[in-house]
Image (cartoon, rainbow, N blue to C red):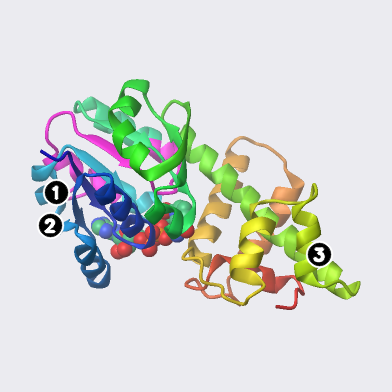
C-alpha cells in the first residue's frame, strides 16, 4: 500500500509539491478554499476532500502550504481545524513561510494533544516544488524529522535541520530578507551599469563569474527580469510579508541593522505603486533599472 499524505493549500507551491509527492509514490489527499486550485490539483492526480475533518480521516501526516501564520493558525487550532479531527500522533509539516513565535505556540498546543509540528519552509519557487528540488530549513524534534524524511526526500534536494520549533521559520525569514536585499542592490548595480554604458546581460555575465553574484544575479535577472517576464510565481504580497516579518524579528530582538531597515522601507514603500498580485521581481522597477 502507498503511504498517504494530506495537503492543505493547493496554490502555486502546494500544487508543485503534490506533483513531487505523487511522483515519489505517495497517495496524496488535498484541500483548498479556491476552486481553480482544487481543479488544478485534481487534474494532476490529487484526491480532493471537502474539509480538514475528511483529510484527517485519510491520514495522520498533513502538509501545509498556506499564505501566512494567520492561515496556519486557523487551519490547526481554528473551528473545524486539525486539532479537532486529528488521528492520534498526527504529524503536521508546515512548509508555509510563517512566524517563529506563532509556530512555537502551535507546536506546544499540538504536542499537548500528542501530535507534532515541524516547521519546514521552502525555497525554490513553484518550479522547484514541482521538480522536488526545493531547499528546506527545518525546526522541530529530531524524531519528528525522521518520520517526515520520506516526504522531505521527495520534495527537496537539500534539507537543513536548524534546531527546535521555530528555527526553520526564522531561517526562512532571514533567507528572504537577504533575497529581498539582493533584488534591490543588484537592480541598483545593473542600473548603474546601464548609466555607465554597459550592456546588462554582459555585466551580469561578469558579475556571475565574480564575487558580486547571488541567486538574484544568477537566476532572477536572466529568468524573470531582463526578459521582462516577471512570472516567477511568487507575489509582491508574499515577499512584502516576509520582509515585514524579518524586520519584526529584528525589532523583537532589539537589533539595529541599518541596511536591512532600509531594505524593509523600500519594500514597504512599494505598496501603493506595485500591486499585491504582481511578481516579486517587480521591486527592481523602483530603482531606475531599465528593463
Ligand atoms: P498561494 O496563495 O498560491 O497558495 C496558498 C493557498 O492556500 C491558496 O490556494 C489558498 O486558497 C489556500 N488557502 C488559504 N487558506 C486556506 C484554508 N483555510 N484552507 C485551505 N486552503 C487555504 O501561495 P504560494 O505562492 O503557494 O505560497 C504558499 C506559502 O509558501 C507562502 O507562505 C509563501 O510565502 C511560501 N513560499 C512561496 C514561494 C513561491 O515562489 N511562490 C516560495 C517559497 C515559499
Dot 1 or dot 2, earlier in sequence: 2
The answer to whether residue 78 is magenta is: yes
Dot 2 or dot 3, earlier in sequence: 2
Q: Quadrant of ligand 1?
A: bottom left
Around disc 2, counting alpha carbons within 10 Å, would you say few (fewer than 14), some (14 to 19), or many (20 or more)?
some
Residue at the image point whose x is 79% and y is 67% from the top = 202
Q: Secondary structure at mark 2?
A: loop
Question: With 119 as the anchor, is 173 left or right in this view?
Answer: right
- Report whether residue 282 is seen: no
Q: x%, y% of residue 95? A: 38, 45
Q: Which residue is mark 2?
A: 49
Identify whether 185 is placed above or below 55: below
Magenta span of residues: 74-103
Around disc 3, counting alpha carbons within 10 Å, would you say few (fewer than 14), some (14 to 19), or many (20 or more)?
some
Identify whether 97 is placed above or below 285: above
Identify whether 194 is placed above or below 76: below
Amino acid at each position: 500500500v502507498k503511504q498517504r499524505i494530506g495537503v492543505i493549500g493547493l496554490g502555486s507551491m502546494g500544487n508543485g509539491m503534490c506533483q513531487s509527492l505523487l511522483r515519489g509514490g505517495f497517495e496524496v489527499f488535498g484541500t483548498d478554499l479556491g476552486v481553480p486550485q482544487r481543479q488544478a490539483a485534481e487534474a494532476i492526480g490529487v484526491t480532493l476532500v471537502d474539509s480538514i475533518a475528511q483529510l484527517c480521516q485519510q491520514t495522520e501526516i498533513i502538509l501545509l502550504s498556506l499564505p501566512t501564520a494567520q492561515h496556519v493558525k486557523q487551519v490547526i487550532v481554528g473551528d473545524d481545524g486539525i486539532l479537532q479531527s486529528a488521528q492520534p500522533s498526527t504529524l503536521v509539516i508546515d512548509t508555509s513561510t510563517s512566524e517563529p513565535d506563532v509556530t512555537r505556540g502551535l507546536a506546544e498546543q499540538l504536542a499537548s494533544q500528542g501530535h507534532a509540528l515541524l516547521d519546514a519552509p521552502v525555497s525554490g519557487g513553484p518550479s522547484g516544488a514541482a521538480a522536488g528540488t526545493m531547499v528546506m530549513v527545518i525546526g522541530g524534534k529530531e524524531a519528528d524529522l525522521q518520520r517526515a524524511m520520506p516526504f522531505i526526500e521527495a520534495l527537496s534536494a537539500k534539507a537543513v535541520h536548524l534546531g527546535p520549533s521555530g528555527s526553520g521559520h526564522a531561517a526562512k525569514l532571514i533567507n528572504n530578507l537577504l533575497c529581498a536585499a539582493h533584488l534591490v542592490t543588484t537592480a541598483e548595480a545593473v542600473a548603474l551599469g546601464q548609466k555607465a554604458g554597459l550592456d546588462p546581460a554582459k555585466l551580469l555575465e561578469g558579475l556571475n563569474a565574480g564575487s558580486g553574484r547571488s541567486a538574484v544575479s544568477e537566476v532572477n535577472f536572466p529568468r524573470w527580469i531582463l526578459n521582462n517576464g516577471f512570472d516567477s510565481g511568487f507575489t509582491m504580497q508574499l515577499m512584502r510579508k516576509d520582509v515585514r516579518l524579518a524586520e519584526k524579528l529584528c525589532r523583537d530582538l532589539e537589533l539595529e541593522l541599518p541596511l536591512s531597515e532600509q531594505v524593509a522601507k523600500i519594500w514597504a514603500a512599494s505598496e501603493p505603486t506595485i500591486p499585491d498580485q504582481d511578481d516579486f521581481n517587480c521591486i527592481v522597477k523602483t530603482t531606475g533599472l531599465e528593463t
